[in-house]
Every structure is written in C-alpha cells, then in structure tokens.
Image (tube, coloured by chain):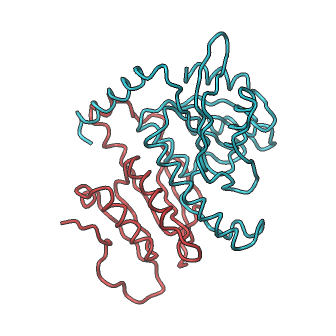
Amino acid sequence: MPTATNADDSDPPDSDGVQIDLISGERMDSMATMEKIRMILDGVHDGNIVILEEGLTPDEESRLIEVTMSEISPDEFNGIEIETYPKSETRDSSLLGRLMGSDETEAKLTVIGPANQIETLHKDETLISALVSRD
Amino acid sequence: MGLFTELKDSISRVTDRLFSEQEPKRIGIYGPPNAGKTTLANRIARDWTGDAIGTESHVPHETRRARRKEDVEIERNGKTVTIDIVDTPGVTTKVDYEEFTDEMEEDDAIRRSREATEGVAEAMHWLREDVDGVIYVLDSAEDPITQVNTMLIGIIESRDLPVLIFANKIDLDDSSVKRIEDAFPQHKTIPLSAKEGENMDEVYENIAEYFG
C-alpha cells in the first residue's frame, strides 16, 4: 500500500554515499498529486536522488515546480534538478492518439535531485548524462 | 484522467474560447529567465500603445511579478486583434541567491531570490488558470533542450493552449534558429530580436493570425 511518506521510511545508514530511490509506476499509480510531490520533495530534501519509472503528468510537473519554489530557502534548499527525455517528433499527442491509448507511451523515466547535487552533462532525445555529487 | 473527463474538458475549453470571442485574449509571455520576455513585452506594448510594461535587465529574475498590459490592439493585413499581454517571471526549478551576489549586496540578493521563487509560482498559476494562449520566448544563442523548456511546452500542450515559439536574440553571433525549430518541430518558430526590433513585422503578422 503506497503512502505519502518518503520512499524509504527507515533511517538511512551513516555513510558518505548518495541514496537513490527508484520508484515504480505501480507505486505512484494510486497516489494523489500532492502525495507524489511530497514524496519526491521529502526525498530530495534528504539529499536523495529520486528516479520515477513513469514520470509525472504535465499538471503534476507544474505543481511540483510551484511547491518546490515555496520551499526554497537561502543556504538550505536551492530547489531541484529534474531531467526527462525531451518529447520526440514522432510521438502522437493528439486527442485521437490519447483516445486510442497511446498516452501510456508518454510515461518517461524521470530523475529528480537536489539542485546543488546534480549537474546535467548531456541530454538529447535518447540519453541523459548527469554528474551526482554528495553535496 | 478518465477518457470522458478528458474529452469533456477539451470540448469545454474549445466552447469557452468560441463564446469569449469578443473578450481580449490573455496571451502569456513565457520562457526561461533571461530569454528577453520583458524586452519583447515592452517592444510590443511600445509599438502599439506607447507605454512599456516592465524593467529590463541582464541580471536574471528582474521580472518577479506577472504584469498585464490590457487591450493591446495589433493591426496586420487588415486584421485587428486585441490582446492582453501578460509578461511572466522566467520559470526555473532552482533559485540560488549567490547567483546575484556579484551584482548586489547579500541581503538584496536573498530578497531577490525570495521574490523570484514567488514569481515562478505565480507564473505557473497563471499558466494553469488564466491565459488563453502563449508566446514562448527562447534565447536562440542558448541550447533549447533544457528540462524547463521541455516541461513547460508539455504543460502548455496538455492544456491545449495555442503557442508560438519566438527565437529571440537573433542579433547575437551564436544565434541558431534551426536549433529551436529542431527541438520543437511541432510548433511554429519565429525568429526575432526584440532588443533591436528585427523581424517584428513577421512577429505581428503571426500574433494577429494565430491569436486573432
């Protein structure tokens, strides 16, 4: 049963490593928008890298930006770095396409982390290359 | 979203637009920080009303509140369109006050960053609730394939809003309009320099045609 809490409710082990939470589409499916956003931002506030198997809808992305802005605090939290693949030319986003069920193909793996810990090195339609630092 | 809810919403948005034909459409000027949104908004407002909308600056996040210029009447080829121009703060997913400390004192930089975050949230709210169309402004000397651009274009498309992409700053040596056309081939891209006033005829023709 999914919850609105961080993907890992247990205390992370003491280490200098970077925790990565890979969250399945199945886990996200039954969550409300704000539950998803809370889970993502709680993870990011803890310094984790959150990877979503199926990403967010455009409306959820818009609300994620809005909530992220409200939580930015000087010297504490600078916001998020988020990466998904750009939309490809051939993707069918028409209403007919969505009616025919091609909406599922819009789900795209999404990587989110603290802005001061992720740096995108390269990005194109098929590849995202990022550098993750500890802080 | 359920199939029928989505269909109902799409039909509702179309009928809303048809029945509000006489009202000036609110056209939001969106894009990342420093793309030249306010320079463009000022250029359009000055050309058609004689007034400016906001202050321009090379320091990011100069515009930290959405500003509306009402009843801007644009005439082109015998066609007149009246629009409200909404100049919005540049959208980003991160704001670090240290970006501004070269230009100002730390207290001012912190205040600017706080206002910038509020401005981004405000811009997102306008996009979800209050604009009828979008002019998406990009700096043509920069790589357009960024997450903010990808996300914002996706959000605009998901709301079925008409959008024109403006490839700004064509006066710069590194400008590449083709890079923008290749990044967003599903939308019309219009090259311009809002600062120098280059290609504004095509800009106004497209605004009149697309949002009229």
Q: Where residue B69 sits: x, y (%)? A: 63, 36
Which residue is drawn at the image coordinates 31% and 37% (left, top)? A102
Q: Is residue A51 above or below residue B132?
A: below
Q: Where residue B34 sits: x, y (%)? A: 69, 50
The N terminus of chain B lies in which quarter of the figure? top left
Classify residue A4 as left or right of residue A84: left
Which residue is drawn at the image coordinates 51% and 45% (left, top)? B152
Q: Which of the pair A22/B109 is nearer the observer?
A: B109
Image quadrant assignment for residue A37: bottom left
Q: Is residue A40 above or below residue B174?
A: below
Classify residue B212 as left or right of residue B108: left
Q: Which chain, by letter, is red?
A: A
Residue B176 visible in image: no
Which residue is drawn at the image coordinates 49% and 57% (left, top)? A83
Residue B198 visible in image: yes
Residue at far bottom of view = A14
Image quadrant assignment for residue B201: top right
Which residue is drawn at the image coordinates 44% and 51% (left, top)? A62
Q: Where residue B18 sits: x, y (%)? A: 41, 20
Q: Which chain, by letter, is cyan?
A: B
